[in-house]
Structures are given as C-alpha cells and as structure tokens.
Image: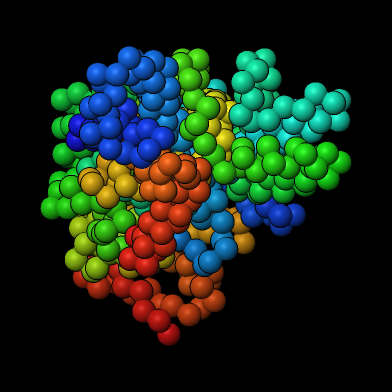
C-alpha cells in the first residue's frame, strides 16, 4: 500500500465572523494521531476541513500530495472515511444497512453490493463487536451500541485515511479500550488514523498527539514528548497532571 | 401482500356504484346491457385512477420524508398544494370575470383540461418558487422554511382572487376537499406516465436517501453530490404531487401515512420504502374511495374528507404510541 498522507497548510477558518482556525499547519503520516484540546479549540473543525466538508478562507489541504479540491468526490470518499461527532443518524435502517453505507464510495448509487462488500461489512462489524444487533433498527439501539455501528460504518469504507470525531463517545470503559486497541492496530497496519478525543489518558496511547487551543496547533509530537505534555497541561489551565504509570501515561486532575 | 390488497380493492371498487358497495347489485350489473359501459367507462377508470393518485402521493411522501429526514414531512411541504390551488382559482376566477364560468365538474373537455393544466403548472410553479427562494436545494431547513412561506403567500393570493370573483370559491372548495369523481381513462394515462417516470427515479436514488439518514455531512463524506440528488428528487416529488393534485385535488394524509404504514411492517431501506409506499398509498386511497362511495350511499362523501379524518386519527394514534420518537 502507498503511504497515505494528509496535510494542511496555513488553514484559516472563520465562522460567524469569529476565527475558528488560524494558520494551521499539520502533517499526518501513517499511524494513529490523537487531537486533544479544550472545548472550542477547533478540533472538529480541523477534521471537517481535512475531509473537505468545511471550506477554508485560506490555506490548502493535500491528500497524497494532491490538493483535496482536485480529487473527484467519490475518489476522495474511497480514501478518507469520516465519523461525525455524536452522529445525528437515526431512522429505520438496520445496523447492517447502515454499515453497508460505508461501501457507497465503492458502489456508487446504482451498483449492487457484491461478495467483497459484504465481507468488508462483516469485518467492520466484527471489529467493533456489533454483529449481535445487525438486524435491529438504528433508532432502537442505545447510544453506545449506535456509536459502535457508526464506527463500523466508517471502517467499512476501508479507506487508508480515517478521521474520527470522538469515536469513544457513549462507550463503556471496556469498549473504549477495545476501540483504542483497534485504532492502534489500524495505525500499525499503515493507515493514517486521526481521532479527536476528550479522554486524555486514551489520547496518550496514540502514536502521536496534537494539542490544540484557540484555533491553533500548540504542539504535535509523540505521546512521550515532554513538550506535548507541557502544552496539554497549559491548554487545560493547569487543571491536570500527567504522570507515567508503567508503560502508559496517566492524566490526573489537580 | 400489497398486490393482493390492491387486487381485492380493485374488485371492491368495480363493485361500488352510486347505490354503494353491493355484491348483489354488482352481479346484477354483469348481466345488464349497461354493465360494460358503467364498469368500463366509469368505475374502472375511477378505480384505477384512485389507485394511481394514491400511489403518486405515497411515492411523493416517501421521497419527502427521506429528503427532509422528517417522518412528518408530506408531499405538499414545498408549496405544491398552494401552487395547485392558486392555479385552479386563477382559471376559475378568470372564467368568472370574463363571463365564461366553468366548474370542476364541467363536461367541457377544454375547460377540464385547463383546470388540470393550471393545477399541474401551479404545483410545479409553487415548488420552483420554493427552491428559488431557498437559493437552491443545498439546505434542508431553508427549503422547509421557504415551503412554508410560499404556502402562506400563495394561499393569500388564492384568497385575493376569490374575493374578487366569489363564484370561484365553490370550485376552489371542491378542489380543496379532493375527489376521484372526475377520473377518466385520460386521467389514468397521465397518472400512469407520471408514476412510470417518478417511481424509477426515486428508486434509483434511494441509496442517497439511505445515506441522508446519517446526516447531510456524513452523506456528503461518502462522495454523494447532495445538491444534484436533491434537485432530481425534488423534480420527481413535484411531478408526482403536481399530477396527482391536478387530477384529484388535495387529498390529505395519504402521502404522510403510507410510508409510516410500510415502516410498521418491517425495517426497510428507501429502495423498498419508495416502492412499497406507492403500493400502500394506492391501496389507501382506493379503500377510502370505496368507503366514500358506500358510507352514505347514494350520497357520496368527498374522498379527501375521508382520508383527512382517517389519516388524522391514525397519526394521532401513532403520536400517542410515541412512534415518532
């Protein structure tokens, strides 16, 4: 597989007259990158810019070295899968039908799903452990169950770049850890996984961490990087402390 | 099941006459010399026409609910009803003011064609105005708000015409309550053509409606051109609604209730929903038409009144059971 790579250069976004992102430069390589920061830092907006849903006033996004705007929509959708923050999904579709929508970039509106598509759906549902309610309607599921279905929908695209906005929302602790392991595995397989996370201990298990505040990238580095840790403490107003606990990092309030 | 239901209702429709629904009277008609004429020229086109009008409303309802991601969306949401109503009132009012009064039940084919054409063009005009006011089809909320504004403004324009030409009010009222009494073979041909065009278009784009259940951004991230999909579906919606309204008036609730009834049977994708809603809409209107002819026979109830009462009760019951939650 070619190394998928997503980069943003000098991104400015203004919404309602208020700047949301200022001159954001970021280079996303294969592996798992977690984006953290306080509310209103611009994390979700950055993800929307990277997937092409939010136009930027200034700056460019490049996918595999080519400007995002130069990609055809279907081609781009096959390469970048996006999971919305607290998905507004509802309706009458079953969980399996929802996950099958992840194959839309490959099938288009008119082709019927084939063996490969069904296998991709099966793999995605197995990865998030949601096969048990494949035939239940989405609106009948709990928040956590629904989140696992929507995550499976994003995985079913089998895109080299995955942009996930709060993928662990509504999940219980065992399933949060399962998602972390999944993202680590996908990163190790060579996918570029970018997730916005509010759970800081989980974020510190990513390969790299991006710290954002006030619409700017404050730090970007390995999860062991002292500068990243200092900036995390700073952007949360010194309300947290980061300490090593064996092979992992702990974040404790202070 | 919907096919069997439709077949049974078609037989009931053929057997229902001015004296109400009576198998013995229907059997007697088979042997009478007037039988072929009554059945072939009056009851058969009315029965088939009622099914087709219901099918177009059901299809339009499924499109509207999918497009606006709202189970309470109905086909009249984009200004088609008020547009059709204004078209009819303009023709009726114009004919009154020029001294050539015509009515909905007129036997004059040209006048009838004029009313049908005015209703159809009015419905399309109402939808076009809504889309123009919403500055395109990119934003669902803007479309819905524009539909409400167009409905109010065109409704006021209708009232202004009827104030100037009060004789047009009766015709407008007859149009507003909805009726299958004027449906002939010509109407059936027009309605069938509309269903043959709008049905496959909606079915082919059903996967986009499925994707829209994830939210507009998620659907766009899957590579869909939402604007193009919306424009095509709005044209199909306007065509189905405009044709049905032009032939049978404003028949309430069929477009709203048919998709709900289909969803009650089984979880379904929009591919199944649009087709089954058309079948369900046809069955609903046909059943309502047979009832409208039978309940107070030999007097006939306007079918739109019956669908409004029955549909309203059904939706209230649905709300009570929190089915919209």
A129 is higher (above) or lower (below) than A238: above
Give x and y (percent) for residue B17: 37, 33
The quadrant holding residue B12 is: top left
In the depicted view, which residue is nearer to us: A59 or B116?
Answer: B116
Residue extending farthest to the left is A132
Whether residue B266 is visible, yes or no, is yes
The residue under the point 34% across, 34% down is: B16
Q: Decide if residue B239 is on the left or right side of residue B43.
A: right
The N terminus of chain A lies in quadrant: top left
Residue B45 % position (x, y): 41, 21
Of residues A102 and B110, which is closer to you in this image?
A: B110
The x and y percentages for residue A105 are 37, 28
**Residue at coordinates 86% horizontally, 30% vertically from top-left?**
B97
Identified at 29% across, 24% down, the residue is B29
- Seen in the picture, residue B89 relative to A125 is either above or below; the reply is above
Please tell me in which quadrant of the rendered image residue B26 appears: top left
Position of residue B153 in the picture relative to residue B242 (left or right): right
Q: Nearer the viewer, residue A4 or B46?
A: B46
Residue at 17% of width from left, 52% of height from top?
A: A133
């Amino acid at each position: 597989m070619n190394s998928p790579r997503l980069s943003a250069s000098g991104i400015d976004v203004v919404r309602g007259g208020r700047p949301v992102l200022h001159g954001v430069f970021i280079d996303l390589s294969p592996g798992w990158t977690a984006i953290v920061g306080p509310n209103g830092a611009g994390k979700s907006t950055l993800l929307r810019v990277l997937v092409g849903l939010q136009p930027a006033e200034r700056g460019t996004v490049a996918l595999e070295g080519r400007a995002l705007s130069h990609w055809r929509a279907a081609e781009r959708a096959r390469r970048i899968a996006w999971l919305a923050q607290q998905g507004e999904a509802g309706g009458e579709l079953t969980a399996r039908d929802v996950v099958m929508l992840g194959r839309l970039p490959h099938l288009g509106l008119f082709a019927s799903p084939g063996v490969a598509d069904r296998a991709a759906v099966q793999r995605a549902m197995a990865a998030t452990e949601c096969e048990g309610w494949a035939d239940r309607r989405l609106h009948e599921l709990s928040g956590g169950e629904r989140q696992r279905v929507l995550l499976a929908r994003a995985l079913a695209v089998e895109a080299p770049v995955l942009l996930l906005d709060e993928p662990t929302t509504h999940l219980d602790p065992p399933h949060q850890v399962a998602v972390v392991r999944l993202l680590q595995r996908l990163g190790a397989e060579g996918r570029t996984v970018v997730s916005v996370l509010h759970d800081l201990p989980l974020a510190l298990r990513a390969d790299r961490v991006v710290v954002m505040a006030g619409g700017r990238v404050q730090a970007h580095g390995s999860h062991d990087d002292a500068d990243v840790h200092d900036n995390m403490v700073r952007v949360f107003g010194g309300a947290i402390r980061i300490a090593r606990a064996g092979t992992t990092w702990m974040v404790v309030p202070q | 099941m919907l096919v069997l239901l439709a077949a049974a209702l078609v037989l009931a429709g053929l057997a229902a006459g001015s004296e109400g629904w009576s198998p013995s009277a229907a059997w007697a008609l088979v042997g009478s010399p007037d039988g072929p004429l009554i059945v072939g020229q009056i009851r058969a086109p009315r029965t088939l026409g009622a099914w087709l009008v219901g099918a177009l409303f059901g299809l339009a309802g499924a499109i509207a609910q999918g497009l606006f991601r709202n189970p309470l969306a109905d086909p009249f949401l984009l200004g088609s009803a008020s547009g059709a109503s204004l078209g009819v009132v303009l023709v009726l009012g114009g004919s009154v003011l020029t001294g050539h009064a015509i009515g909905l039940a007129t036997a004059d084919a040209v006048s009838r064609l004029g009313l049908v054409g005015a209703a159809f063009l009015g419905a399309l005009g109402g939808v076009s105005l809504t889309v123009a006011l919403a500055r395109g089809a990119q934003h669902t909320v803007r479309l819905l708000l524009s539909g409400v504004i167009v409905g109010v403004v065109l409704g006021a324009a209708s009232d202004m015409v009827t104030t100037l030409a009060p004789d047009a009010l009766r015709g407008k009222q007859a149009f507003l309550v909805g009726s299958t009494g004027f449906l002939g073979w010509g109407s059936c041909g027009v309605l069938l053509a509309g269903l043959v065009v709008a049905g496959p278009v909606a079915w082919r784009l059903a996967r986009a409606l499925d994707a829209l259940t994830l939210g507009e951004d998620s659907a766009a991230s899957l590579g869909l051109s939402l604007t193009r999909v919306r424009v095509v579906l709005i044209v199909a919606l306007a065509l189905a609604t405009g044709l049905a309204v032009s032939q049978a008036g404003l028949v309430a609730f069929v477009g709203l209730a048919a998709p709900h009834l289909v969803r009650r049977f089984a979880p379904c994708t929009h591919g199944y929903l649009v087709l089954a809603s058309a079948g369900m809409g046809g069955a609903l209107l046909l059943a309502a038409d047979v009832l409208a002819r039978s309940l107070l026979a030999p007097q006939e109830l306007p079918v739109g009144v019956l669908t409004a009462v029955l549909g309203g009760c059904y939706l209230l019951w649905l709300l009570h059971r929190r089915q919209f939650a």
